[in-house]
Amino acid sequence: MNRILLIICFFCYFFPVVSLAAENNDTTLSLEQCIEIVVASNPELAMARADLENREALLQSSKKDLYPTLSAQYSYLHQPDEMYTLPDLFTYGVTAEQPLYKGKSLVTSVKQAELSRESSQLAIEQLTNALVFEVYGRYYELLRALKLEEEARQSVLRLQSHRKDANAFYEAGLIPKNDMLQSEVELAQGEQDLVDAENASAMAKSRLNVLMERPVGSLLNIEDHSDYVIQDINWDEVIEKARKNRAEIAQSDKAVQIAENDIILKKAPFLPTITLSASYDRVGDEVGAAQAPGFPGEVKTVKAIATWQLWTWLKDRDEVVAAEKNLQKAKKSVTKTVNEVTLDARNSYLRLEQAAKRIKVSEKAIEHARENYRINQAQYQAQLATSTDVLDAQTLLSQAMTNYYDALYGYQLALAAIDKSKGLFGQRYSK
């Protein structure tokens, strides 16, 4: 019994401490730090890097097909037929073979492996470009949620202040009961909105935690990014860099080159294969291949072998036709990819212009909403305005703040979308 109690005390003492230590991590992460964590820990990127290493190994393997091969052999020959009086023969030797020509397939296979490796590197760049932009999205989503949570909290304070005034006026007999009850109802709604805002913040933290491969409920503090500078972005520059830098377009070009080389590989069987071979053998009637009477002890040969496949029921021709169709498909895919990249860049550019206009409008709206609320509150306290006027002004102020934060972080995310459209994230973080 004492031993069981000791074990229970041990778990109760140490495990809560470990849990609290993990949960009380108050380190504030910057956007750049979040990006570094995601790039280092993302499982999709890890798989893409493993694929690149796989393609690199296959490239080295294909290069070795150009080199000569060396083989050794040992044989024993026994002929039990009485018609022959040949002794049992033991043979051992070595053979070196050097492929000279295989219808361009040797060199083309190396080129294919190089293109495959480069395509894998571009896949990492493309994935990184999208992944970093996702970090921006979840980071700004969390900042927006935190700002809206704070605004909901301020809204509750304003509603509490108004309810206090309404209760005082009601007790003094200056307003009817339904006006006082209206303030109570609006306060209850404000408290419900605060609960929803707190939940939205918690979910935004969870989404960013999951993206960084952290426990979903981990505490997370991030740096604020409320400052902004309206930038003058040139559309021609955006589309030029997008078409130059985007990994998707480069991958499509690689696919065309791979399809062209595949046609060469499929045509290779139409041409002869030439191999140079050199061998050295020792032949004897003992296990050690000691020279047998009447047989040469050593056999040395050098030969060139040409092989030409003459008929395969047109199978090779059909494979060439299939490869040519695949090339046509790859070329059409380039056009499709360029169009998709162009539309993505255009959408990012228009979103940036829209967000910049919304910021200016929302800033003015906040000024007007705050002044409107101040005037209505003062007039209500002087009994020159109704409770409805104050509550409407409060609603307009909360909506103006929400619109402002939507515009603010929408603009910053639109700037990130421009960089993503240009392919800058992939180039910067995939090296």
Image (cartoon, rainbow, N blue to C red):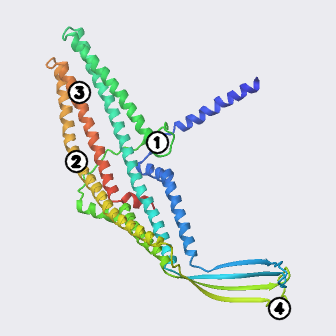
**Residue 286 place in picture, x, y as percent:** 86, 82
Sequence-wise first label, 3 or 2: 2
4 and 2 marks in contact (CB < 8 Å): no
Task: Identify which amino acid the numbered label 3 is placed on.
Answer: Gln
Task: Give the structural element (helix, strand or loop) at label 2.
Answer: helix
Q: CA distance from mark 3 to mark 2?
A: 27 Å
The image quarter in which residue 119 lies: bottom left
Q: Earlier in the sequence, mark 3 or mark 4?
A: 4
The residue that disc 2 covers is: 354
Amino acid type shown at disc 2: Gln
Question: In the image, what residue occupies the spot 22% across and 23% down?
Answer: 391
Measured from the top left, where is residue 339 in percent x and y?
Answer: 28, 59
Tell me the amino acid under the disc marked 4: Gly
Label 4 sits on residue: 294
Q: Is residue 294 left or right of residue 388?
A: right
Question: Is 172 situated left or right of 312 in this image?
Answer: left
Q: Quadrant of residue 195?
A: top left
**Mark 3 touches mark 1? (CB < 8 Å):** no
Marks 3 and 1, the one that precedes in the sequence: 1
Mark 2 or mark 4, which is nearer the start of the sequence? 4
Closest to the camera, between mark 3 and mark 2, is 2
Tell me, yes or no, whether the two marked residues, 1 and 4, touch with CB atoms within 8 Å.
no
Task: Please state which of residues 44 and 350 is positioned toward the viewer in this rendering.
Answer: 44
Please state if 97 lies on the left or on the right of 263 as rendered: right
Residue at (49, 72) in percent of width and height: 313
Which residue is depicted at the point 17% across and 30% down? 372
Q: Which residue has dot 1 on it? A: 209
35 vs 71: above or below = above
Give the alpha-carbon distance from disc 2 to disc 1, as whole Å.
Answer: 30 Å
Which residue lies under the disc numbered 3?
394
Q: Amino acid at mark 1?
A: Asn
